[in-house]
Amino acid sequence: MRRLLVTSALPYANGHIHIGHLVEYLQTDIWVRFQKLRGRRCVYICADDTHGTAIMIRARQEDLGEEELIARMKSAHVADFKAFDIEFDHYGSTNSPATRGFCGQIWAALRKGDFIEEKEVTQLYDAQAGTFLADRFVKGTCPKCKAPDQYGDSCDRCGAHYSPTDLIDPVSTLSNTAPEVRKADHLFVNIEKLHGFLDEWTQGGEHLQPEVANYLKGHFLGEPLRDWDVSRPAPYFGFEIPDSPGNYWYVWFDAPIGYIGSTAEWCEKHGERFDDWWRSPETEIHHFIGKDITYFHTLFWPAMLKAAGFSLPERVHIHGFLTVDGEKMSKSKGTFILASTYLKDLDPAYLRYYYASKLTSRMDDIDLNFDEFIAKVNADMVGNVVNLASRTARFAGRTGLSAEYPDDGGLFEKAAADGGAIAGAYEKGDYARAMRIIMAAGDRANQYVEQQAPWNLAKDPAQADRLRDVCTVGLNLFRQLAVYLAPVLPRLARQTGELLGEPIASWDQSQKPLLGTAVNKFEHLMQRVDPKRVEAMVVASRTPDEEEGPESVPFDNDAALLAEPLAAEISFDEFARVDLRVARIVAAEDVPGAKKLLRLTLGLGGENRRNVFAGIKGVYEPADLVGRLVICVANLAPRKMKFGVSEGMIVASGGGGGEVYLLSPDSGAKPGQRVH
RNA sequence: GGGCCCGUAGCUCAGCGGUCAGAGCAGGGGACUCAUAAUCCCUUGGUCGGAGGUUCGAUCCCUCCCGGGCCUACCA
């Protein structure tokens, strides 16, 4: 018997579940429910990912112990999942004895296979916070382009990659003190030793979508694989490496091992043999992940499993990101919607169906468009599917279903035959296709009811049998849809079972009509989406600083400060060295070939002109800029750039990306005036 | 610069070498009134991004170009 072990990526214990996460958990849950409905042995395993520097820092900020932090977050995650009908067979934590045990086991295998190497790594250390600093906890001036305030791994101004120790004037974002350089021995996994295996595993078979296999081939497998740094020196929230005291496994080492640990807990609880699930050719392992973590799941993870003698994934299903109204989720626009916020206003079934109607087997991003969301759910769910029951069940309540299935012109048979195509689509992850086929069957059923006009039959007592037959057909066609939709809409399936007196538990129920049973009192199966509630949800998701009343002082949260902590203190003299001037943009033009740059001509009064490149393309239209006043750094050394020499900078706030806000002086300021 | 994906009706997407290119929603007209202003019928709407090529025949295959997205590199 084919056994299936299915996982979703482990959500990080650093934040709450949002609608972007839900794409993955719903995609997986639908697949698992489908497999179970088909009678497959299928187990759905997940867990919280709990280790790493970010957890340690957050626990400190909230003045909690790490254990307390991750315990709280786990119960929040579990509650969110449950509310969305995401049904795990087991939900564990990477911070568990089971996961620790498997980390040790895999580690021992890596040691034994001589995969582990020790190398000295130079890292920045925050003496005040008493911790080594991960790259993104260090900021400083880019060694290449001298841009200030850049993270420790790369410069988002010039894109240069470097080590945090290369930063000029580095500052710890934890304590705002200058970190010191310290050396530490790190442990590395030499996965190049498994290069041949990875070539074969990624390129052969159907383990990966073709675009993923190509990506790996092009970016990683064409050259020797770099050693993977899997240890972090204390203090670190995680598991200490048994044969290397003072060192901890890096969070990405133990995170996927959480799949195994969590499975073991499930086995323990249900009296299953662990080896049947992770060391058996009878079990297919399926991972569902987002495209951002492709690298870990398609190179390191198979390498670890291979080295330690566990089963390899049969397939890694990779999905794209969620956008909302065509854009990245945004807190200020109210499209960064937490699962718990959604639930206050809307039925989870809506999102389950909507995502299902958009998901394919490709790793394309999917878009949540609220107008479409409302239209689609109302038209398909309420207007088509639920309406079928709604318009026939009432009439059938008096008589129940006929004892024999009446002539329906082949409709039931046709929809039963669709089952193969629908199942095939589910199996491949092409839920959008499955939904299309199901909705087409619903359309045909509604046509039937329309033609038979049971409301007319109901007026004539002599037609009672005929009426019962028509309702028997209508309700059976509806029930077929409920079976096909059961993976997506478990509640609808349950309600349908209650309505017709037989629970929906198997795909096969779509193939044979239900006859001779009573029909219970009909109750609404699903409410229409209320656009006002959607709007309310978006408003509730907006960060407070967007909700300013006309008179009141707006409340500003501290997101910006947290994202970019204050720089180290400077003296007045140091400040005075920077010569800021008011300037008028006298010309602005597009720079062909540049992704972010516009060419600006700044006037400082009289004939004083400056040619400045500004990274604001796509944010500001050149035509809108001409004539306005800005503030420029006037004594910045000229800088040669790809498209010409830049003679200064204009100042702007914003976190980069699309968020750029130019500074302007109040009216009355004159070009050339210095800013003091 | 390299890699991958995409560009089909107003919108979201099917189709993919072969009869007049489809669906849902939106738009227009009608019918019905059982049903959650649901449903049903009819209908408007596309030079299938552009240009070449292969072919008896291309939306579908090949090449180039344009446009969008993602990744990667580089330059700022």
Image: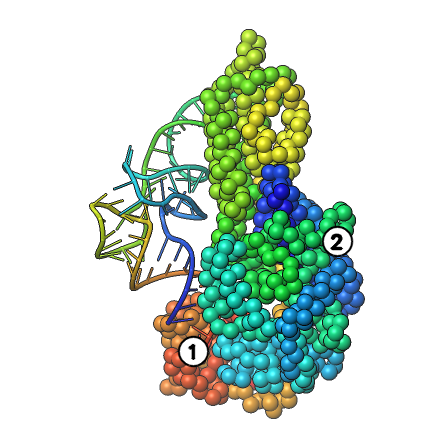
Q: Position of residue A466 (x, y in %)?
A: 54, 14
Task: Give the residue type at disc 2.
Answer: Glu
> Please, what secondary structure does the residue beneath circle 2 have?
helix
Instruction: Give the number of the mark in front: 1 or 2.
Output: 2
Determine the residue positioned at 60% across, 73% down.
A190
Of A449 and A631, which appears nearest the observer? A449
**Looking at the image, residue A341 lies above or below residue A176:** above
Of A129 and A50, which appears nearest the observer? A50
Determine the residue positioned at 51% across, 26% down.
A412
Determine the residue positioned at 53% across, 39% down.
A423
Quarter of the rendering occupied by the N terminus of chain A: top right
Q: Position of residue A334 (x, y in %)?
A: 59, 56
Quarter of the rendering occupied by the C terminus of chain A: bottom right
Q: Position of residue B18 (x, y in %)?
A: 30, 40
Q: Is residue A35 visible?
A: yes
Tell me the tag on residue A265: 2
Classed neighbour count for the residue bearing mark 2: other residues with Cα under 10 Å, few (<14), some (14–19), many (≥20) = many
Q: Is residue B32 left or right of residue A34?
A: left
Of A337 and A267, which appears nearest the observer? A267
Q: Position of residue A537 (x, y in %)?
A: 61, 50
Hey, which residue is sitting farthest top in the picture?
A: A462
Question: Which residue matches tag 1?
Answer: A613
Q: Is residue A118 left or right of residue A625?
A: right
Hey, which residue is sitting farthest bottom in the picture?
A: A573
> Please, what secondary structure does the residue beneath circle 1 have?
strand
Determine the residue positioned at 38% across, 79% down.
A643
Q: Is residue A526 visible?
A: no
**Looking at the image, residue A279 lies above or below residue A568:** above
